[in-house]
Amino acid sequence: MAAAAAAAAAVPAALIRGRSAAPLLVLHRRARNPKTPLRRSAASLHPLPRSPPPPPPPLIPNAASSRWRWRRRLFCRPAAEGGEGVREFRRRLRIADVKGGASEGVGWGGWGRSSRSGDGSGLVGCRVEWSIVHRVALLRKGLNFIILDLLRVNDGSCLSNMQCVMIPDAEGYDQVELRTVTAGASVLVEGVVVSSQGAKQKVEVKVARLVMIGKCDPLTYPIQKKRASREFLRTIAHLRPRTNTFGSVTRVRNALAYATHKFFQENGFVWISSPIITASDCEGVGEQFCMSNTRESNDCPITTIPTTKDGKDFFGKPAFLTVSGQLNAETYASSLSDVYTFDPTFRAENSNTSRHLAEFWMIEPELAFADLNDDMACATAYLQYVVKFVLENCKEDMDFFNTWIEKGIIDRLNNVAEKNFVQLTYSDAIELLLRAERKFDFPVKWGLDLQSEHERYITEIAFGGRPVITRDYPKEIKAFYMRQNDDGKTVAAMDLLVPRVGELIGGSQRDERLDYLEARLDELNLNKENYWWYLDLRRFGSVPHAGFGLGFERLVQFATGIENIRDAIPFPRTPGSTEF
């Protein structure tokens, strides 16, 4: 017993990972055949114990319940004072891992949905037990077997599929004959990975057992084989992740978020969390959501707080949802040097366009002892880093986007990752636009902000698809905190423009001079009392510093080719829409 417990404790936690939503799936690792080599990428780093405990019994319905209860089948550590210890957490082997090479004695779980065939390799002759929750896309009858063709076992790790072959002798074959296994249905499949006889895939699963978990009415299931419009899918945002497009968008979004943290952490930045509720307006444009619910007295229960403007403010003064975490990031940059935020922000813009959201995520680094040139260098390095990361780690999804969303997107991203960025002043950009042999919808004039059509012309036409950084903008069209240049007309601000999107990053050197900052607040009629703490940063040991902001959803648009920003976020918040 002690030896078994010790062996169980030695099993590494990084081998398999399960879902936090435990009702969906349970899996376990069986004792492997010592003659069968392990998959190198996992086993070379985390070898299995020589004598692991026997696997738990097969999944069976809970006798005390009318429904299946799923849990992770994991080995338990012994408790210090007797009894059973807490189960050891393990990384779940993903479908992408299995299709990428040989493995044995493992399982996975996920959902099925419409997808295109993938390319598996290295699994021939390896015995695998599968614990799969998925949704079936198609049934096709053969002479003496059933092919569950293009099963979308999608646990979020890949786009490709695993074809399953089921003979009549297999357990659960009656579910196929009764045609209860329909598109959208959830089933449990166990089988062996074998070499595929078909040309569309190298390996397939020979099914030994199939169990129906959750039925799905094919007549009312919203996601059908026929391709649905993006507009329709936004009305079923709770189901659209099951489609090819939104599964791929989500994986790329995840990769971009991971690469963002990885870049800043590797370069010595400290992540900080900025507040959602604030009394300050970073941009000074008044596009804030007022969320200052009121109450009549301080002892009034929170559940009875009215939503009118009568009575006393809950926070003692008007409060808003933040439009940016920049000002808060500056406070920590003055102490920790280089910091960044990655948090949700809100804009009360009543814009029903493909470029605007009421709720979105912002990446905002702040660099202490830095000027505008340092800021531009950081923005360039960051963008090239995350683009390279996606191209290297999301190849299957990027091929999908290149085929079905935007042809040439991979070449476009490679240009960003490999080519030098162009730099020019705002004044030079205005002259370039005035010389353009094109009529723009919006006027071009010094002192007016560049519109999306201007930005895209500069980067797509004038410079042939290369990213462009425009700098030194008129101070009248920029925020109060930007450092004024010596000419008194412009500020040390920059915008990074990319093809297809236009402005992707906006940044500036912050004005570290107290007198200039106070004068600028007065010019814009902003209440200095609301910024007393921000001004204190200039009173007590001010330092030159710079930073930039990046709308994360626009980055997702840029990396995937998705045209509407509402499709770049799981649950878009737009005027008149707060569903889901």
Image (cartoon, grey):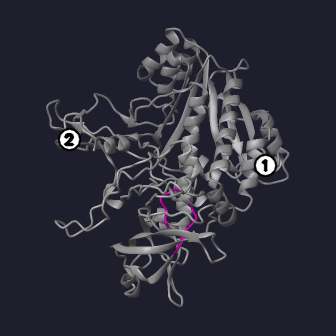
In the picture, which quadrant includes the C terminus?
bottom left
Q: Is 213 or 330 nearer to us in this picture?
A: 213
Helix, strand or loop for the magenta stretch, by majority: loop
Indicate the position of residue 36 as horizontal and vertical percent values: 54, 57
- Tell me where the magenta segment starts and ends, as one range: 153-164
Q: Name the residue that disc number 1 marks.
A: 465
Please report the residue visible at 43 percent of the width from the left and 61 percent of the height from the top.
109
Please report the residue visible at 81 percent of the width from the left and 50 percent of the height from the top.
461
Task: Find numbered disc 1 in the image and state the secondary structure of the residue it sits on.
Answer: loop
Q: What amino acid type should be assigned to the residue bearing mark 2?
A: Ile
Please report the residue visible at 77 percent of the width from the left and 42 percent of the height from the top.
418
Please report the residue visible at 60 percent of the width from the left and 28 percent of the height from the top.
547
Q: Is 383 or 126 nearer to us in this picture?
A: 126
Indicate the position of residue 203 as horizontal and vertical percent values: 59, 69
Compared across the picture, whether 77 is left or right of 274 comes to: left
Could you classify mark 2 by the number of other residues whose Cα lies within 10 Å: few (under 14), some (14-19), or many (20 or more)? Answer: some
Q: Are marks 1 and 2 in contact (CB under 8 Å)?
A: no
Indicate the position of residue 526 as horizontal and vertical percent values: 48, 26
54 shown above or below 549 = below
149 shown above or below 342 = below
Q: What amino acid type should be assigned to the residue bearing mark 1?
A: Gly
Q: Which of label 1 and label 2 is nearer to you?
A: 1
Q: Is 209 or 276 nearer to us in this picture?
A: 209
Residue 157 is covered by the magenta coloring: yes
